[in-house]
Image (tube, rainbow, N blue to C red):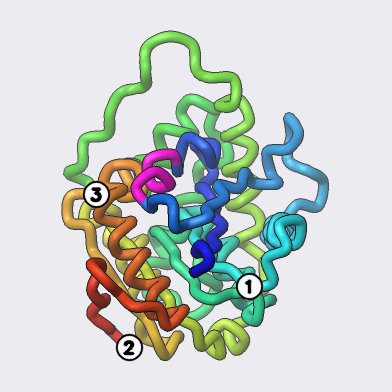
């Protein structure tokens, strides 16, 4: 049997290889997994005119270079928003979709609490880089979560690109047209992972909206002790790998084997 083909998209902070090293190891040799870096960070500054479509095109190029006509797509945070955009534009290329706390999921059907919470991200624009990152992290976890202090010593070189990259994501979220009807028509299995300690007005709203409005084959898994900045692909990679194996087995019609089967929560 051929290996399972999957492209993994990171969020706007950690590079892809650092974000997904543990998960790739946990997935094992029967998975051909590619941790793809964001197009956003190919140069020192975000490319002119960059949008989610720039990342969608980058995923297509990655798959085409490898000769993958179809594949599974996994995206975390900003990469999760890219994964949703890809599913809306190129559903025929995907065998399944997995989103891990996507940073954004369209501009419709927002609850009052989500609208108020989302507006706070615009207030970050005027902050200097150090304050910006701290405030950006604080908005995405529960009020009682204690975030770790910044690591001692100079930051890694790649960190210098992140404030501008995060701002680029926030800008494209304002006017990107995520096609609701095309996304609703996506019929392949969809897996959604959310941390129980992430901000309820953020991830709670997005998960409920996608479960309620879209996807005939939707599976939600809660990781009670995780939040947006200690996500399961880094802290609980074995558990997440088991869930993804079950998800992919369903999508490909493979025997579930020791991985069992996900409990379905169809909308």
Specify few, some or many for label 1: CA neighbours under 10 Å numbering under 14, 14-19, or 20 or more.
Answer: some
Q: Sequence order check: which comes first, mark 1 or mark 3?
A: 1
Q: Sequence order check: which comes first, mark 1 or mark 2?
A: 1
Q: Is residue 240 left or right of residue 100?
A: left
Res 265 → quadrant: bottom left
Residue 87 horizontal/vertical position (percent): 59, 74
Query: Vertical placement of 143 versus 82: above or below?
Result: above
**CA distance for labels 1 and 3:** 31 Å
Callout 2: SS? loop
Residue furthest front in the image: 1
**CA distance for labels 1 and 2:** 24 Å
Callout 1: SS? loop
Query: Vertical placement of 52 versus 95: above or below?
Result: above
Query: Vertical placement of 90 versus 235: above or below?
Result: below
Residue 186 horizontal/vertical position (percent): 54, 85
Quadrant of the rendering where the C terminus is positioned: bottom left
Residue 245 horizontal/vertical position (percent): 36, 65
Q: Sequence order check: which comes first, mark 2 or mark 3?
A: 3
Q: Nearer the viewer, mark 1 or mark 2?
A: 1
Find disc 1 in the rendering and name its residue: 70
Q: Nearer the viewer, residue 101 or 218?
A: 218
Q: Nearer the viewer, mark 1 or mark 3?
A: 1
Res 118 → quadrant: bottom left
Q: Nearer the viewer, residue 5 or 209?
A: 5
Tell me if residue 227 can be seen: no
Whether residue 25 is in magenta: the answer is yes
Q: Is residue 125 left or right of residue 193?
A: right
Find disc 3 in the rendering and name its residue: 226
Find disc 2 in the rendering and name its residue: 266
Instruction: Give the magenta range.
Output: 21-26
**CA distance for labels 2 and 3:** 24 Å
Whether residue 37 is in magenta: the answer is no
């Amino acid at each position: 049997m051929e290996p399972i083909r999957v492209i993994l998209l990171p969020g706007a902070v950690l590079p892809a290889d650092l974000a997904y090293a543990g998960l790739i190891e946990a997935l094992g040799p029967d998975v051909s997994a590619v941790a793809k870096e964001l197009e956003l960070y190919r140069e020192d500054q975000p490319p002119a005119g960059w949008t989610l479509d720039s990342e969608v095109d980058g995923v297509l190029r990655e798959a085409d270079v490898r000769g993958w006509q179809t594949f599974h797509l996994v995206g975390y945070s900003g990469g999760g928003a890219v994964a949703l955009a890809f599913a809306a534009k190129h559903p025929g290329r995907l065998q399944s979709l997995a989103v891990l706390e996507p940073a954004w999921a369209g501009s419709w059907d927002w609850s009052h609490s989500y609208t108020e919470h989302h507006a706070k991200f615009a207030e970050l624009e005027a902050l200097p880089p150090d304050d910006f990152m701290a405030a950006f992290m604080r908005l995405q976890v529960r009020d009682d979560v204690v975030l770790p202090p910044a690591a001692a010593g100079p930051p890694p070189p790649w960190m210098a690109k992140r404030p501008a990259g995060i701002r680029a994501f926030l800008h494209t979220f304002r006017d990107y047209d995520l096609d609701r009807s095309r996304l609703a028509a996506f019929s392949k299995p969809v897996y959604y992972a959310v941390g129980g300690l992430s901000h309820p007005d953020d991830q709670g709203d997005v998960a409920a909206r996608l479960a309620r409005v879209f996807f005939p084959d939707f599976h939600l898994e809660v990781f009670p002790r995780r939040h947006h900045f200690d996500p399961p692909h880094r802290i609980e990679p074995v558990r997440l790998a088991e869930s993804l194996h079950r998800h992919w087995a369903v999508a490909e019609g493979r025997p579930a084997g020791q991985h069992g089967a996900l409990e379905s929560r169809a909308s």
